[in-house]
Amino acid sequence: MKTPLILRYFIWSMLIFAVSLGLLSIRGLRSLELQSLDFFSSRKYGPESKYLKETDIPVVLLPIYAQISPDLYLEVVRDAVRHLKKAGAKVVIVPLPEYLQPSAKIIKSIQGMVRDSIVVFAVSGPMSSQFMFDRDPTLGDRTNWWVRHPLYHRVDVPWGVMSQYTKHLSILTRFVPTGFRDFDTGEPVPDIALLAMKRYADIPDKAEVQILSSRVPIGPYAFQIERDGLSYVSYRPTQRRWIEIYPSIQPATDSLEYFPARDTKQPRGVAIDSAWQAHRGKIVFIDWSGSAGYRYPSPAIAYTRIFEALFNRSFVKLHNEWNVLLITTLVILLSVFSYTVRNGLAVFISLVLAVASVAVSIWLFKTHDVLFEPIYIIVPILLCGSILPIVKVSGEKRLAEEQIKSLEEENRRLVELQRSTTPGNHF
């Protein structure tokens, strides 16, 4: 018994639906996620980009790009922290090198910075490692939310994790405000942005934070957390100055010198003093290229995006809760449409819907800070647009063959009937 075409359509539609939901549930296309978003949005920020008007962000970077050893780096930072405290900086975030060996010299430098009371130390999270550069780490997997104490609990220091992850040259940054834990003790470890904001708002480091309706309030501001435990921020072009002063080690004299970032006609000493004063009341993030190997954006640059989103209340909102309903609706509609119209039109409409889903996701992201991942919606559209026309052609071919066979049998029957009734055939 041959299967009717409508039943075959139903069976293939159910298979497409099952495959689409299966890929969605296991995130089987993880490597393709956000590809369209990064591809199209990266072309937005060219030389003619329009800069956004935003509030002043109390965050400044202090870059240390010299190729120096970890112990010399900490000495340079210790000297810079003294100047920053004298200038009135509120918080100084100091990234520590990966695999730091706590020698006596390093511990002495760290203890000296701890006594200055404005320093918090940042430790690279598992997603920041240079060994993850060519891989897509599963930041959403909570089994990765563990980090070790930078000094193996030999010295008590205020510290947090740099949990941010940004794909190379991507416009989207993800991080975990709260959820990491100490590998040895199991105690919660805050993201360094959360710890710095506590200091900025004069909240004790050990004060417990509460998640209120997917938000972590810190003073008048709040980190927005999605259902997966992550926060999302996007890159926004800005004309804001992030750097006021450059420290540099002079090879000839082996001494540390500071230079103002902006050109000025003032005497050098006055210009330096003015540059230091620009850090008053600010959160200062030390930007050192040796903290976790080369990576763009560097942790400090990535965190400027995070602080921008925090102070401007412009976190990206994740909306993928309609995926199951959209997949179900699309499979039903495209199945009915493909069954009732010509195959060429069905394929064309599928391609239009796929392009439209990408365009809508980019529009939502750019204009409303809404992140909608279209890849799992495109899958059933393309499967329906490619498989169902083949099923239809196959069914029509089988139906045509059956009709031809039926006509041939009818033709043979008529020929035999004609022969049996022709005069002279009975002798």
Image (spheres, rainbow, N blue to C red):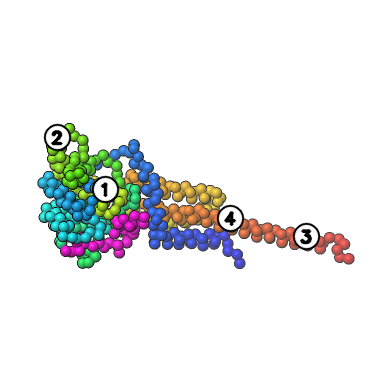
Determine if residue 405 is in view. Answer: yes
Compute the Cα span from label 3 to label 2: 114 Å
Dot label at residue 110: none
Give the magenta range: 126-154
- Sequence-first tag of 2 and 1: 2
Give the labeled residue for mark 1: 301
Q: Are marks 2 and 4 in contact (CB under 8 Å)?
A: no
Say which of 7 and 36 sits in front: 36
- Sequence-first tag of 1 and 4: 1
Image coordinates of residue 142 in percent, x first then y, are 30, 62
Q: Nearer the viewer, mark 2 or mark 4?
A: 2
Compute the Cα span from label 1 to label 3: 87 Å
CA neighbours of label 3 inside 10 A, class few (<14), some (14 to 19), many (20+): few
Determine if residue 322 is in view. Answer: no
Under mark 4, the amino acid is: Val
Give the labeled residue for mark 4: 393
